[in-house]
Each structure stands twice: as structure tokens, then as C-alpha cells.
């Protein structure tokens, strides 16, 4: 059974930081494109950041320079370091993994991030 489990969400003041984790079981994250998505209240889910391999990353314009995605294959985990948080970053954050060849996709259950002004 494939599981992606996000953690690290919570309540933080504007300007603060959080580090989200996505831990996988039942699959090897190292052979997946892993991305973080978020769904803000009343909005559609949107792509925040993605990582291919160990160092090919991309970011939404709204988080560039503030967020950093990384992975640790020894822990079968991917992380999202979020700095300089803004109230508009408040959302449910989801981890997604897509196999680099067969394109099977998996989602985590999400973790809530609330940034107070």
C-alpha cells in the first residue's frame, strides 16, 4: 500500500517559517517527481514547488525566494521549507508523487498551514 504522509503544518505568525515533510511508504520517492500543492480557502489547488531527481526544482512565482523544496532519499522523504510566510500562504498543503516512467500518481492527505497577520 502506498502512503504519502505530510506533517509539519500549523499556525505561525507572518514572517515566520515552517518546514513541511512528506514521508513515503510503499514507493521509492527517488524515482518520482515530487511536488507540493496547496489549496487556499475558496480557491483551486495549485502547484507550489516540484523536484525532479535531487536538485532540479521549480517554484510558483508567488513563493520563489521564500520556499525551498528538497529531498532525502535515505529517509524516503521530501521537504518544503517555507520562510517569510504571508497570510496568503494559508492553505492546506499536499504532497504528490508521480513515477518518472509509468506516471502513476499518489497524493497525501494534506497538512494545514495557517499564517496569522
Image: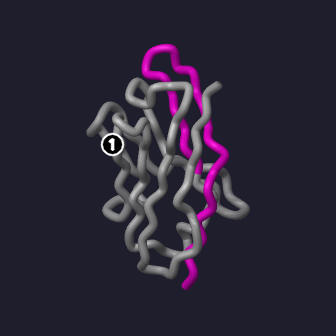
**Which secondary structure type mostly characterizes the magenta part of the structure?**
strand
Asked which colour scheme the image uses, the reply is: one colour
Q: Is residue 109 magenta?
A: yes
Q: Is residue 44 magenta?
A: no
* Mark 1 crowd level (few <14, some 14–19, many ≥20, 10 Å Cα): some
**Which residue is disc 1 drawn over?**
57
Q: Residue furthest top?
A: 102
Residue sitting at x 55%, y 38%: 96
Identify the residue at horizontal 42%, vertical 79% (top origin): 15
Q: Position of residue 6 (x, y in %)?
A: 56, 49
Q: Is residue 85 above or below residue 70?
A: below
Tag 1's secondary structure?
strand
Residue 80 drawn at (x, y percent): 42, 54
Residue in view at x 52 percent, y 36 percent: 24
User: Which portion, as a residue range, is magenta?
Assistant: 94-117
Q: Residue lying at the far bottom in this picture: please name it.
A: 117
Amino acid at each position: 500500500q502506498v502512503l504519502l504522509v505530510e506533517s509539519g503544518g500549523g499556525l505561525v505568525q507572518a514572517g515566520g517559517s515552517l518546514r513541511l515533510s512528506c514521508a513515503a511508504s510503499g514507493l521509492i520517492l527517488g524515482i518520482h517527481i515530487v511536488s507540493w500543492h496547496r489549496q487556499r480557502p475558496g480557491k483551486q489547488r495549485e502547484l507550489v514547488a516540484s523536484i525532479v531527481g535531487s536538485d532540479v526544482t521549480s517554484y510558483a512565482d508567488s513563493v520563489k525566494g521564500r520556499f525551498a523544496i528538497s529531498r532525502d532519499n535515505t529517509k524516503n522523504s521530501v521537504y518544503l521549507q517555507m520562510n517569510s510566510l504571508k497570510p496568503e500562504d494559508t492553505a492546506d498543503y499536499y504532497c504528490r508523487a508521480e513515477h518518472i516512467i509509468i506516471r502513476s500518481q499518489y497524493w497525501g492527505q494534506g497538512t494545514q498551514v495557517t499564517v496569522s497577520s
